[in-house]
Image (spheres, coloured by chain):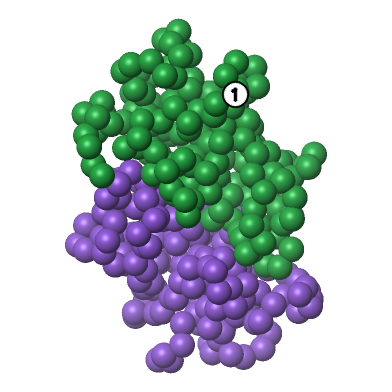
Chain colours: A green, B purple
Amino acid sequence: MSDLAFQDYYPDNTAHCYGCGRLNDQGLKLKSYWDGEVSVARYTPRPYHIAIPGFVYGGLLASLIDCHATGTAAAAAYRAQGRDMDTEPPLRYVTGSLHVNYLKPTPLGIQLELRGEIVESTDRKVIVEIELFAGDELTVRGEVVAVKMPEGLISLSLV
Amino acid sequence: MSDLAFQDYYPDNTAHCYGCGRLNDQGLKLKSYWDGEVSVARYTPRPYHIAIPGFVYGGLLASLIDCHATGTAAAAAYRAQGRDMDTEPPLRYVTGSLHVNYLKPTPLGIQLELRGEIVESTDRKVIVEIELFAGDELTVRGEVVAVKMPEGLISLSLV
C-alpha cells in the first residue's frame, strides 16, 4: 500500500480544501489512509480548537468527519474500479449531507482517530459512516452522503 | 433590543469556543442577534476557507450553523423565561447532534447570512433549524439538537 494519503492524489485544482487540501497552507491538511477495509485518519486539534476549555470544538470534529468521509468515498470508488488513485479519470466527491452525533465531550490535547466505513455505494454517491475516537473512547459518530463531483468540474482550471 | 450579541453574554468560562467565543482570538467570533422571532448571524468567510476554489468549505458552514444554533437555543430559553441574557442563572447549550444539507455550492468572497428558528423546545433541549444564504440564495440547511449544559459545568472554573 502506498505511503501517500488519499488527499495526496487529489488533482491540483481540487486540492485547496481548508480541511484536507495539501495546497491550503492555512488549512487542517487531514490525511486519510486504508487500514484493510477501514479508512483511518489521525489529527491532533490545535490548542485553540476549544468548545469549552479542555474539550474539542464540535465544528472542527464535523470538519474532520466531512473530509475523512469524502476522501474515503473517493478511495473506495477507485478501489471498486480496480484502479490506483493516480490513474485517470480522477474521481472526487463533495459532501451532500453531513450528520454528526456528539456522544460525549472530546478531550483536547490528544491525537484523535477517525475510522470510516462504506455503508452504501452507487455510481453517483457513497454513504460513509465515521467513528471518532479519543484514545479508546468513541466520542462522536458521523454519517456523510458523498456525491461524485462531475468530471467537468474537476478538470476545470479554477485557479 | 440590546446591541450585544447572544455570545457576548456567555459566562467567561464558556466564552472560548473556536466558533463563537469572544475570548478565542484565533476563532471565528460568530455573533448572533434577534430579528423578531428569527435569529440572524452574518459572517464573511476568510479567503482560505475554500472547498474548491471559488466556494466555501463545508466544514466552516457546519461550524457556523452549529454556533448560531446553540446561541439561538440559549437566547430562546432566556426569552421563554422572560429574562434578559445577563441575568442569573446562566443558560448555555451544547450540540447534541448536527445535520447539514448542502443544497448547492456556497460562493466564497461575500458575506453569508444565517437565519435560525426554534422548531421544538423542552426543558432539556431545543431543536433549531438554520437556513444559510449567500445573497438571496439559500445554499445550506441545518438542524441542530442543542442540549442544555448542566449548571454545574457552567459555573466550574475550568481555565
Expressed as whole percent of the image width and height from the top left, the position of residue A46 reads: 64, 57
Expressed as whole percent of the image width and height from the top left, the position of residue A57 reads: 61, 59
Q: Who's the residue at 74% across and 63% down the image?
A: A54
Q: Residue furthest top?
A: A82
Position of A65 with respect to B108 (left or right) is right
Expressed as whole percent of the image width and height from the top left, the position of residue B9 reads: 56, 84
Quadrant position of residue A64:
top right
Quarter of the figure with the C terminus of chain A? top left
Q: Nearer the viewer, residue A64 or A15?
A: A15
Any part of residue B7 in sight: yes
Report the residue marked by disc 1: A3
Q: Give the chain of mark 1.
A: A
Q: Who's the residue at 68% across and 85% down the image?
A: B89
Please tell me whether residue B42 is drawn above or below residue A142 in the rendered image.
Answer: below
* Amino acid at the residue labelled 1: Asp
Q: Who's the residue at 72% across and 46% down the image?
A: A111
The 10 Å Cα crowd at callout 1, few under 14, some 14 to 19, many 20 or more, is few
Please tell me whether residue B93 is drawn above or below residue A107 in the rendered image.
Answer: below
Position of B73 with respect to A131 (left or right) is left
Please tell me whether residue B82 is drawn above or below residue A141 in the rendered image.
Answer: below
Quadrant position of residue A49:
bottom right
Position of B112 with respect to A145 (left or right) is left
Q: Nearer the viewer, residue B147 or A117?
A: A117
Expressed as whole percent of the image width and height from the top left, the position of residue A82 reads: 45, 8
Q: Who's the residue at 29% across and 56% down the image?
A: B108
Any part of residue A66 in sight: no
Q: Secondary structure at mark 1?
A: loop
